Image (tube, rainbow, N blue to C red):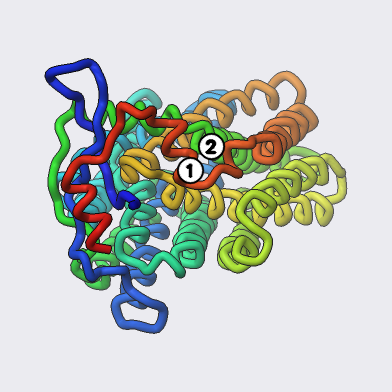
């Protein structure tokens, strides 16, 4: 016997927890297979969603020195335009998962992208720093409906044999979006000001949003249901008891924290002597993102050959090495370290985020949402702490801070026995014998 999708519902008669299935997809549906029209449209739509999300989420990053100078604030304060958005996203992913359980993944993602695009055009023109940061928080909260739900969507709509590859393609779309947002904002900022630069990026995101709406196929792997808040809380608690998931959450948190820190403050280093680069020229370093586009696509194939755990650990170690390379004074070596760090980050993120969706045995939407809570909360916190390191120790402090954080990630992956456990063992460990399958779950098992 095996269980398909499950949700945790508290028992009224006794203080225990039982498992009953969430709304089940049609029994014959196994997901779009590679080469089919539905597969191609799903992949294209997810790539567009990745572009629309990450172009505007991180668009201020390439012009933080300009923002700091114009507003008369410090580097850590300017970085709040990035950290506020990622914090808003972190706090919103779980509420968005509740919405998606009621209205469906596609409708939730569509609403999130439309709201974020509208906010993205308006927020850059906020008259004060406080309003700008608050607006960016709301923009991030709107975007919270995309990352976790996109991963859940691909697991429900794409055949299981292809999900590692599609997860890599989605992360690749995210890298293209991140590159486009950063590279586009800087030259426009030099010509028309940083506010127009950010609004221009949001206009690009609106185009990607329209493409998502037109491309995404009708959902076939999920029937919208709607869990009560108590049930959602039980699902969240069940996933937090899974030690393997906690390791994956920690890996995602550490690698994104290091990644955002490097890109937040590299512009401040390159605008100072001996480099004295303009914002438009500095933004060209973000072409290192292309390394992430390639690595995230290759990661799916590497995990099939070498296993997720080995690839995840290798990516974290490579990030640490890349951060140390940026300590060199020579610009070409700095760029080499940046490319290595970027490629390794997107590889690690593709593995960890995809593994969460595969590993979760209850509340898959909540499991992937929790990954994003840890991921973006760490992006906000570590990204800001990196600014403190910059103020007190310069680039050496930033690079060593990132190298240390990203080195912890592979040590956690290699040292965790939980990631070796099969799904059945994990289920038993996380959910004791009082979690027995309901009759509906048993029928689902026997039918398959």
Disc number lying in front (2 or 1):
2
Residue 428, placed above or below residue 291 = above
Disc 2 residue crowd, few under 14, some 14–19, many 20+, Cα 10 Å: many
- Residue 393 x %, y %: 76, 23
* Nearest to N terminus: mark 2 or mark 1: 1
Q: Quadrant of the C terminus?
A: bottom left
Q: Residue at x 28, y 27 (%)?
A: 234
Examine the image and state in which quarter residue 87 appears: top left
- Residue 329 x %, y %: 86, 44
Q: Residue at x 20, y 40 (%)?
A: 438
- Residue 258 x %, y %: 64, 37
Disc 1 residue crowd, few under 14, some 14–19, many 20+, Cα 10 Å: many
Task: Describe the element under mark 2 as helix, strand or loop.
Answer: helix
Task: Describe the element under mark 1 as helix, strand or loop.
Answer: helix
Residue ID for mark 2: 244
Along the viewing direction, whichever of 142 and 123 lies nearer the viewer: 142
Along the viewing direction, whichever of 57 and 186 lies nearer the viewer: 57
Image position of 277 (left or right of 294): right
- Residue 250 x %, y %: 56, 33
**Residue 275, visible in the rendered structure:** yes
Q: Residue at x 76, y 54 (%)?
A: 335
The disc label shown at residue 60, or none = 1
Along the viewing direction, whichever of 166 and 303 lies nearer the viewer: 303
Q: Residue at x 69, y 44 (%)?
A: 316
């Amino acid at each position: 016997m095996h269980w398909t999708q499950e949700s945790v519902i508290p028992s009224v008669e006794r203080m225990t927890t039982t498992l009953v299935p969430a709304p089940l997809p049609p029994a014959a549906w196994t997901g779009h297979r590679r080469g089919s029209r539905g597969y191609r449209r799903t992949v294209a739509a997810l790539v567009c969603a990745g572009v629309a999300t990450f172009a505007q989420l991180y668009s201020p990053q390439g012009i933080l020195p300009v923002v700091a100078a114009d507003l008369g604030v410090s580097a850590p304060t300017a970085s709040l335009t990035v950290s506020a958005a990622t914090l808003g996203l972190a706090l919103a992913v779980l509420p968005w998962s509740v919405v998606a359980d009621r209205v469906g993944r596609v409708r939730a993602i569509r609403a999130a992208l439309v709201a974020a695009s509208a906010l993205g055009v308006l927020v850059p023109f906020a008259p004060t720093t406080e309003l700008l940061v608050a607006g960016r928080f709301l923009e991030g909260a709107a975007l919270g409906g995309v990352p976790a739900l996109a991963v859940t969507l691909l697991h429900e709509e794409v055949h299981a044999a292809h999900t590692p590859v599609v997860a890599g393609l989605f992360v690749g779309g995210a890298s293209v979006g991140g590159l486009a947002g950063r590279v586009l904002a800087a030259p426009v900022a030099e010509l028309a000001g940083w506010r127009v630069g950010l609004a221009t990026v949001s206009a690009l995101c609106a185009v990607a949003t329209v493409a998502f709406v037109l491309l995404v196929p009708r959902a076939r792997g999920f029937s919208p249901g709607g869990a009560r808040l108590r049930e959602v809380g039980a699902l969240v608690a069940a996933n937090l008891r899974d030690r393997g998931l906690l390791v994956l959450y920690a890996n995602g948190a550490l690698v994104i924290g290091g990644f955002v820190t490097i890109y937040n403050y590299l512009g401040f280093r390159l605008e100072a002597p001996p480099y004295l680069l303009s914002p438009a020229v500095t933004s060209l370093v973000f072409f290192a993102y292309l390394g992430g586009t390639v690595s995230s696509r290759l990661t799916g194939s590497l995990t099939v050959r070498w296993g997720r755990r080995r690839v995840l650990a290798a990516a974290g170690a490579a990030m640490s090495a890349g951060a140390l390379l940026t300590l060199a004074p020579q610009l070409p070596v700095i760029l080499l370290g940046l490319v290595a760090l970027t490629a390794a980050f997107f590889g690690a993120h593709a593995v960890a985020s995809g593994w969460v969706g595969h590993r979760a045995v209850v509340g898959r939407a909540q499991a992937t949402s929790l990954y994003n809570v840890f991921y973006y909360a760490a992006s906000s916190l570590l990204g800001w702490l990196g600014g403190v390191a910059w103020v007190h120790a310069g680039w050496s402090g930033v690079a060593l801070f990132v190298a240390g954080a990203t080195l912890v990630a592979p040590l956690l992956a290699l040292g965790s026995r939980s990631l070796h456990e099969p799904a059945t063992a994990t289920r038993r460990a996380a959910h004791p014998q009082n979690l027995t399958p309901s009759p509906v779950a048993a029928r689902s098992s026997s039918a398959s």
